[in-house]
């Protein structure tokens, strides 16, 4: 448990991503949020607030109520409720805080892009940038769970790269234990509210540079006869062929989707839609239109996969037949874990 006389930041190093588990819109949640946003003096801080739960005015009022100091050097709010457009939020002191809205039909890609754009605009400033996402609970209520996890993973990676210190709010009472357990490993640290106080947990920092061998089990898993050696899985494609197939991010999305299909044959339109959704869920990926993805699939990716004997494309029926291969799928699971978690 934490000492009430200490701030929450006392219990963490400069973790770039923190999961804040507490009932939303209640006093402990509010005070912890401002505590994490004010680990440095306001004049040494840039603050980005991403809100899906309440209005920008309400988020600002929490700052004014809970923070002892003035406004940060730079502040901005991304209003991801899809209920307002870009504008300015008046303040009682230093000017106005810009509010960036998202389109009414916004998806996770639009939200991720708005966040990445604002963080990128501050990347060369001298001040420390901190971010609050309020909340992952609201994201999970509105979007597919796997896509939310992909967005969270991408944002945490981006924040680590840019030196941003971010915390994400989650109300554990709104989710089952499995969902909360899935979220925990995505963060450097977790701070959880209980009736007896806060419980902080910080992941042990790596002392060596991570490698494929140390971070992810090798393709095929461990051999039953010798757990220290990878199991050999038959691969009918050469190593160079596999690397060539996986060199294109969009073709990787295509293969990730195909290996996860419950049936061998899938309509091309469905495949295009699902690849489109995968790419748009990752801010680090470009996301062209569905039509452009369809053209790329027909003229580039499907012929390449057909040549390798992985799929058969029926142009008349507009269907793709996928041929299962244990070795390739084992390798794909390995690469997918490294790329998107």
Image (cartoon, grey):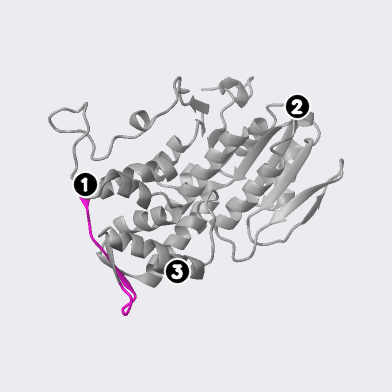
x and y, in percent, of residue 50 in the image: 64, 47
x and y, in percent, of residue 149 in the image: 46, 47
What secondary structure is marked by label 3?
A: helix
> In this view, which residue lies farthest toward the left?
225
Q: Residues within 10 Å of mark 3 (few under 14, many from 20)?
A: some
Q: Residues within 10 Å of mark 2 (few under 14, many from 20)?
A: some
Name the residue nearer the viewer: 317 or 86: 317
| Magenta span | 314-326
Is the residue 172 above or below the residue 190 in the image? below
- Asked if the stretch drawn in magenta spans residue 59, the answer is no
Q: Nearer the viewer, mark 1 or mark 2?
A: 1
Residue under label 3: 294
- Asked if the stretch drawn in magenta spans residue 323, the answer is yes
Residue under label 1: 235
**Residue placed at 42% from the left, 28% from the top?**
210
x and y, in percent, of residue 261 in the image: 30, 60
**Residue placed at 64% from the left, 36% from the top?**
33
Name the residue nearer the viewer: 173 or 34: 34
**Residue placed at 44% from the left, 47% from the top?**
175
Name the residue nearer the viewer: 34 or 129: 129
What secondary structure is marked by label 1?
A: loop
x and y, in percent, of residue 266 in the image: 31, 68
Name the residue nearer the viewer: 173 or 233: 233
Is the residue 142 above or below the residue 232 in the image? below
Count of marks overlaid on the render: 3
Q: Quadrant of the C terminus?
A: top left
CA gap, disc 3 to disc 1?
29 Å
- With 290 as the anchor, is 34 left or right in this view? right
Point out the tag, 2 or 3, that comes first from the N-terminus: 2
Point out the tag, 3 or 1, that comes first from the N-terminus: 1
Residue under label 2: 41
Q: Nearer the viewer, mark 2 or mark 3?
A: 3
């Amino acid at each position: 448990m934490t000492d009430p006389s200490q701030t929450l930041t006392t219990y963490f190093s400069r973790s770039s991503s923190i999961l804040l588990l507490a009932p939303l819109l209640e006093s402990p949640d509010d005070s912890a949020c401002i505590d994490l946003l004010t680990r440095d003096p306001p004049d040494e801080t840039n603050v980005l607030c991403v809100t899906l739960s309440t209005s920008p005015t309400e988020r600002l009022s929490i700052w004014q109520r809970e923070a002892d100091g003035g406004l940060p050097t730079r502040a901005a709010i991304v209003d991801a409720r899809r209920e307002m457009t870009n504008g300015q939020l008046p303040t009682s002191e230093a000017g106005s805080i810009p509010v960036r809205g998202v389109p009414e039909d916004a998806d996770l890609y639009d939200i991720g892009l708005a966040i990445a754009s604002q963080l990128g605009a501050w990347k060369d400033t001298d001040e420390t940038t901190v971010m609050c996402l309020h909340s992952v609970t609201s994201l999970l209520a509105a979007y597919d769970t796997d896509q939310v996890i992909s967005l969270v993973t991408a944002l945490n990676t981006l924040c680590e790269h840019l030196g941003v210190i971010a915390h994400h709010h989650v109300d554990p009472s709104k989710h089952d234990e499995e969902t909360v357990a899935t979220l925990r490993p995505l963060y450097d640290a977790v701070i959880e509210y209980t009736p007896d106080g806060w419980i902080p947990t910080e992941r042990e920092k790596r002392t060596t540079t991570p490698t494929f061998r140390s971070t992810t089990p090798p393709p095929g898993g461990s051999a039953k006869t010798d757990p220290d050696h990878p199991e050999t899985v038959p691969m009918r494609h050469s190593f160079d062929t596999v690397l060539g197939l996986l060199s294109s991010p969009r073709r990787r999305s295509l293969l990730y989707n195909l290996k996860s299909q419950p049936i061998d044959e899938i309509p091309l339109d469905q495949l295009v839609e699902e690849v489109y959704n995968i790419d748009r869920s990752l801010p680090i990926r470009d996301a062209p239109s569905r039509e452009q993805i369809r053209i790329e699939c027909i003229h580039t990716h499907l012929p390449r996969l057909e040549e390798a004997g992985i799929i058969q494309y029926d142009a008349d029926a507009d269907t793709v037949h996928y041929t299962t291969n244990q070795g390739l799928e084992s390798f794909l699971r390995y690469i997918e874990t490294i790329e998107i978690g």
